[in-house]
Image (cartoon, helix red, strand yellow):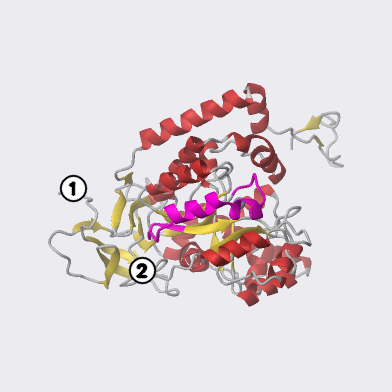
Amino acid sequence: MNEFEAGRPVVLRGGTVLPMDGRRVLPGTDVLVTGDRIAAVGPGLEAPDDALEIDASGGIVMPGMIDTHRHMWQTAVRGYGADWTLTQYFVWFYLEHGKLFRPEDVHAGNTLAAIESLDAGVTTVVDWSHGLRTPDHADAAADALQSVPGRYVLAYGNLHQRPAEWATAPEFRDFVRRRITGNDLLGFQMAFDVVGDPSFPEQPAFEVARDLGVSVTTHAGVWGATGDDSIRLMYEHGFMTPGTVYVHAASLSADSYHRIAATGGSISVSTESEQSAGQGYPPTYAVRAHGIPVSLSMDTSVWWSGDLFSAMRTTLGADRSREHLEAHAKGETVTHCALRADQVVDWATRGGARAIGRDDLGTVEPGKKADLVLIKNDASPVSFPLLNPFGHVAFQAQRGDVHTVLVNGRVVKHEHRLVGIDLAAARAGTERTVEYLRGEMGEEAWEKGMNPDIPTAKVLDNPYTYTDFRSDATHRL
Ligand SMILES: [Zn+2]
């Protein structure tokens, strides 16, 4: 029998379990998985004779993490836009080079992003797939997601047409009928933005989503792109529903937050993105004040990593930074942080499950789907002492510490190595895409796209320096 055969029971022995039903920590606890479910959680569990035994001692067992917004196709050009702003991103993907992507390029990006997620303990990703120009692109996206043993939600979008156009096209209906068949590992959403035009041209797309009974995910509160008018129009037309996911929601008034809170939607916070790209300040400080549910996301690996450890870390940092600065502005001092480590771990797990309407995910409890992560790295000096497990996950751990990952009861990573994944094929796919894009764009455009002009800045005059060695020059600051 294959050691990791799907359907084989698995027992994780003696880990520190974070069930994510509050702040509870269960040291020295076993987790038994049979079929696709968690069968039992407790000390000294009896397991079937054929169960795969995994020593979780010294490690942390937690639910698989859930990323509620990632443009997976863009992973094909990983890291290319490290120095971009949102403006450069829009030009590159929306106006110029994004349309070069062929179906096989979407496939390459999605495949690599899907594999990368599993490696980092992210067991579910919402693929905010807004490059689906043709049915072939859409099939390629879905094929890639189904070729990797993770859990994905295809959020269908097409930035090359107006939402009302692609969402009402027969090809779209046909795709939904053919590919979205209730498969537990491939969910579905519709992904489009509301531009704030008073005539509300997105209405037909919302109506299609309502007809299909699927949720809409939308970039909201993005400085210079979508704002309060977008929220108001959605509200006035009755399309703000509990399943709606508002991505970023960083440049919104209190009135918009009130509308989101009142209609039961949730906000997908991409802190690394908001910090670099310019949508607005990472909004958790404001969102918490309005009692709106939060999930975390990475947005795109054209800039950032695909792991939620960095999302948890930067979100804690950004929220606390804001809290301190707000207090300082009033001459006050924060003596107790409001946002705690366990809260960001909750957002990365249960928050994501809530956002995508999956109450069978996001916790470690009997009966729930067995999407699990074991964080354990005996070779690492960062693995001990393990005193504060939530703090350890948020501030100490990283993707290299992900020892074992299960999705739907199946082991997909074990002892730090992916199981049954063809990384060489994924590498070859992305190499072909990069070669093709470079060729189509030409070397000059390729280089320029990756290296935006740097604004010049003059070093400020400093009254304490007597030698004037820098004042004539302009510098990169
Ligand atoms: Zn996005």
Q: Is residue 161 magenta?
A: yes
Seen from the viewer's position, the closer of residues 394 and 347 is: 347
Q: Amino acid at mark 1?
A: Asn
Q: What residue is drawn where x is 74% and y is 66%?
A: 328
The residue to which callout 2 is attached is 364
Q: Quadrant of residue 419?
A: top left
Position of the C terminus, as image quadrant, is top right
Task: Say if disc 1 is inside 8 Å of ligand 1.
Answer: no
Q: For the magenta stretch, what is the residue range?
A: 158-187
Give residue 2's mark. Answer: 1
Residue in view at x 73 percent, y 61 percent: 200
Q: Is residue 164 magenta?
A: yes
Taking 72 as reference, is 231 above or below it?
Answer: below
> Does 145 sit above or below residue 35?
above
Q: Position of residue 393 (x, y in %)?
A: 45, 59
Residue 224, relative to residue 45: is it above or below?
A: above
Q: Please tell me whether residue 116 is drawn above or below residue 389 in the rendered image.
A: above
Amino acid found under the numbered disc labelled 2: Val
Q: Secondary structure at mark 1?
A: loop
The location of residue 238, given as percent across then percent down, is 66, 72
In the structure shown, which secondary structural element does the residue marked by tag 2 occupy?
Answer: loop
